[in-house]
């Protein structure tokens, strides 16, 4: 009995320490922790949980007060915590091919053992799968729908090589109605269309703020690196459409603007500016950022984090619901190589980069397929060199440090030589 | 000024000494287990052979996979830039370098001043490298030095289709058990290496003159197969294997 107060004191101290820690970490960890805690206790609080793909239309879920959970974001967390290889091996022993995407492998394995950094994702009440990012998600979500025995909604976005046709708009727009019906059935109540409008406005505002945050890196020295963007990205992916995102990115934007005003760079001595293409090599982001910084090279932008604000031009502020069909269909991974190259060239100019680092990601075929063509186009149009790194976003078995290290050293030697350093 | 270049590769370690812009001498030893030891040994042996004192050497540049393991170098540089510099020094008309080393292969495109314009390296796989040839030589019980000349006698090169060294080895073993002629198998192996390299050089769009460097350049069979695949003449200098070390020594002259 005497020990009780001691224990209480001990925990109070722990909480205080944690709170202090969060203040330093700019609240991101706290927000994410609360988010996952809420999702995990949804059953107790009577809310529903939907698993959704990273490029999926999340706004109707937010409007229905359903908690969206992202297996891909979870996959990134697994990768960053270096727990991916074990889970990938586990899925392979379940019978999945090692050629399958490592997000899918680690998620499928994790569901059966509740492993990973947060002890598995909360059980879903429904699944929402949008194939604008890849085709793998279809089978992946079917597997999970069978495993959890929950309803699955498939939102099919046709590939847009160039442009966007009337037929596609009609086809995708009609699915939005079906999506709402699906949610109404799963939740047992009607959608509040005014609320959905409000959520849409917040989503668009969040995306614009995220774009503004990323754009601060166009300054030299860049106040943030793509590695910072990989970290701050979590909110626009998981919680867009909520006021939390607006608050967070407003603060972040102010901070970045302040750094720009005071000439503070993200790395100590920025001399070379690089653009990153593809999903990060999550278990190796720290190694890579230190490696590049040792060459005074800064990853100032990337095609990955900007994908969550790349289609704002298609969104009609006053008619979010209708226009989101186009916005969700024309995202970076659902367009032809020529359009992708155009986006890359725009970024090359905007961020004034000296070279491109491309991650040929063993897991992500849609992202990696056109890279050699984009490389050729960029080299021809802008004459800057591109480096290709072969690796994987989660599975560490596909990473060879000494080979990647030599390639980066050689690439930097070329850039230095070109700039006459 | 006297400068030196040390190229510590996965199989062999090479050294070159340059004095007043001329090659004074080169040396090659096996790397073995300890890269640092190999780098030090080849350097000391070469200096002794040439009668040059360490204190006479102005600058040393190291390169190759073990480039950061030696302590006495003034700078470590990658094989890409060193092979480019070495090839250009030996022949300033060279615009493309194909280097096949122990554990990787690379293609390098140079500009008119000998600067590296672009490069490509093999993916994370041993196919198309010196190590691949070593494994095959073991399976065929042929000395690696005999590989090149033997393959020129091939009437009908075998098809080695596997991209994986381990699987290619079992392919070779099954060809042996079928009684296929050795020279045909060896020629097939060379074809498969050349195909791999050609995929890389086509991507880079290499231009003549093309030179091949690295230990594998000593294999005439690979050189001929490569010429057929890329449809360009491929030069090989007598310094092919030590080209990276020579380039390192050349780059050392530019160090402040």
Image: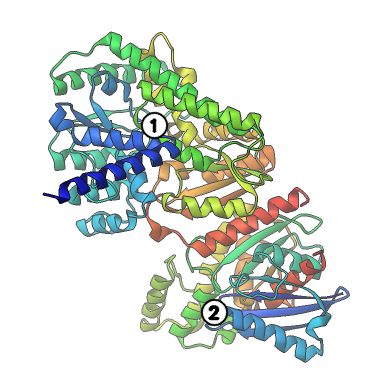
Q: CA distance from mark 2 to mark 1?
A: 63 Å
The percent coordinates of residue A279 (x first, y second) are: 45, 43
Q: Which residue is mark 1?
A: A235
Q: Are marks 2 and 1 in contact (CB under 8 Å)?
A: no
Q: Residue at x 81, y 62 (%)?
A: B93
Query: Disc 2 is attached to a residue of which chain?
Result: B
Residue lying farthest to the front in this orientation: A2
Q: Nearer the viewer, residue A244 or B122?
A: A244
Which one is in front in this view, the residue at disc 2 or the one at disc 1? 1
Query: Disc 1 is attached to a residue of which chain?
Result: A
Q: Residue at x 58, y 79 (%)?
A: B35
Is residue B132 at all visible to an observer of this figure?
Answer: yes
Determine whether, in the image, residue B39 is placed left or right of residue A366: right
Q: Which residue is mark 2?
A: B154
The 10 Å Cα crowd at callout 1, few under 14, some 14 to 19, many 20 or more, is: many
Question: Is residue A197 depicted above or below A385 in this figure?
Answer: above
Question: Is residue A348 depicted above or below B134 in this figure?
Answer: above
The percent coordinates of residue A361 (x first, y second) are: 44, 49
Question: Is residue A124 depicted above or below A168 in this figure?
Answer: below
The percent coordinates of residue B46 (x first, y second) are: 74, 86
Q: Quadrant of residue B41?
A: bottom right
Q: Element type at marker 1? A: helix
The 10 Å Cα crowd at callout 2, few under 14, some 14 to 19, many 20 or more, is: some
Q: Nearer the viewer, residue A84 or A403?
A: A84
Q: Element type at marker 2? A: loop
């Amino acid at each position: 009995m005497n020990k009780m107060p001691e224990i209480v004191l001990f925990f109070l101290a722990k909480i205080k320490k944690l709170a202090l820690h969060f203040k330093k970490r700019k609240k991101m960890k706290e927000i994410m922790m609360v988010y996952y805690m809420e999702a995990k206790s949804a059953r107790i609080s009577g809310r529903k949980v939907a698993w959704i793909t990273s490029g999926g239309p999340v706004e109707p879920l937010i409007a229905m007060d359903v908690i969206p959970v992202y297996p891909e974001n979870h996959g990134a967390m697994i990768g960053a915590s270096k727990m991916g290889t074990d889970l990938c091996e586990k899925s392979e022993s379940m019978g999945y091919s090692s050629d399958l995407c490592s997000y899918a492998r680690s998620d499928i394995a994790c569901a059966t053992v509740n492993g990973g950094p947060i002890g598995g994702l909360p059980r879903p009440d429904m699944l929402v799968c949008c194939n604008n990012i890849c085709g793998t998600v279809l089978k992946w979500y079917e597997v999970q729908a069978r495993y959890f025995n929950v309803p699955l909604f498939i939102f099919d976005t046709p590939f847009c090589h160039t442009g966007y046709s009337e037929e596609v708009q009609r086809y995708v727009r009609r699915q939005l109605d079906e999506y709402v019906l699906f949610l109404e059935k799963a939740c047992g109540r009607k959608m509040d269309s005014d609320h959905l409008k409000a959520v849409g406005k917040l989503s668009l505002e969040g995306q614009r703020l995220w774009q503004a945050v990323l754009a601060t890196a166009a300054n030299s020295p860049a106040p943030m690196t793509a590695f910072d963007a990989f970290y701050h990205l979590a909110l626009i992916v998981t919680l867009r459409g909520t006021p939390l995102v607006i608050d967070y990115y407003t603060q972040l934007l102010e901070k970045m603007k302040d750094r720009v005003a005071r000439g503070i760079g993200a790395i100590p001595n920025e001399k070379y500016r690089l653009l990153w293409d593809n999903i990060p090599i999550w278990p190796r982001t720290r190694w890579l950022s230190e490696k590049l910084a040792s060459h005074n090279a800064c990853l100032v932008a990337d095609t990955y984090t900007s994908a969550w604000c790349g289609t704002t031009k298609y969104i009609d502020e006053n008619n979010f619901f209708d226009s989101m069909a186009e916005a969700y269909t024309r995202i970076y991974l659902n367009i032809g190589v020529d359009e992708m190259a155009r986006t890359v060239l725009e970024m090359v100019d905007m961020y004034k980069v000296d070279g491109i680092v491309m991650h040929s990601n063993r897991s992500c075929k849609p992202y990696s397929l056109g890279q050699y063509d984009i490389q050729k186009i960029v080299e021809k149009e802008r004459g800057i060199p591109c480096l290709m790194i072969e690796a994987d976003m989660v599975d560490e078995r596909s990473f060879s440090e000494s080979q990647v290290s030599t390639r980066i050293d050689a690439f930097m030697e070329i850039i230095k030589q070109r700039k006459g350093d | 000024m006297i400068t030196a270049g040390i190229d510590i590769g996965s199989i062999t370690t090479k050294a070159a000494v340059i004095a007043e812009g001329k090659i004074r001498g080169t040396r090659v030893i096996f790397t073995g287990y300890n890269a640092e030891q190999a780098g030090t040994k080849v350097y000391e042996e070469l200096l002794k052979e040439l009668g040059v004192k360490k204190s006479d050497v102005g600058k040393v540049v190291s390169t190759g996979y073990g480039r950061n393991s030696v302590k006495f170098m003034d700078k470590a540089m990658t094989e890409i830039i060193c092979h480019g510099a070495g090839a250009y020094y030996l022949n300033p008309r060279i615009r493309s370098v194909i280097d096949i080393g122990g554990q990787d292969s690379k293609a390098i495109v140079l500009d008119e001043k000998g600067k590296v314009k672009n490069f490509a390296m093999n993916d994370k796989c041993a196919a198309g490298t010196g190590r691949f040839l070593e494994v095959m030589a073991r399976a065929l019980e042929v000395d690696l030095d005999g590989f090149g000349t033997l393959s020129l006698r091939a009437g009908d090169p075998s098809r080695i289709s596997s991209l994986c060294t381990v699987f290619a080895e079992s392919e070779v073993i099954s060809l042996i058990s079928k009684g296929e002629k050795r020279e045909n198998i060896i020629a097939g192996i060379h074809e498969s290496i050349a195909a791999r390299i050609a995929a890389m050089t086509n991507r880079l769009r290499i231009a003549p003159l093309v030179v091949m460097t690295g230990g594998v350049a000593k294999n005439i069979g690979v050189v001929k197969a490569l010429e057929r695949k890329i449809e360009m003449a491929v030069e090989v200098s007598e310094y092919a294997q030590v080209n990276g070390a020579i380039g390192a020594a050349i780059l050392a002259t530019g160090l402040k």
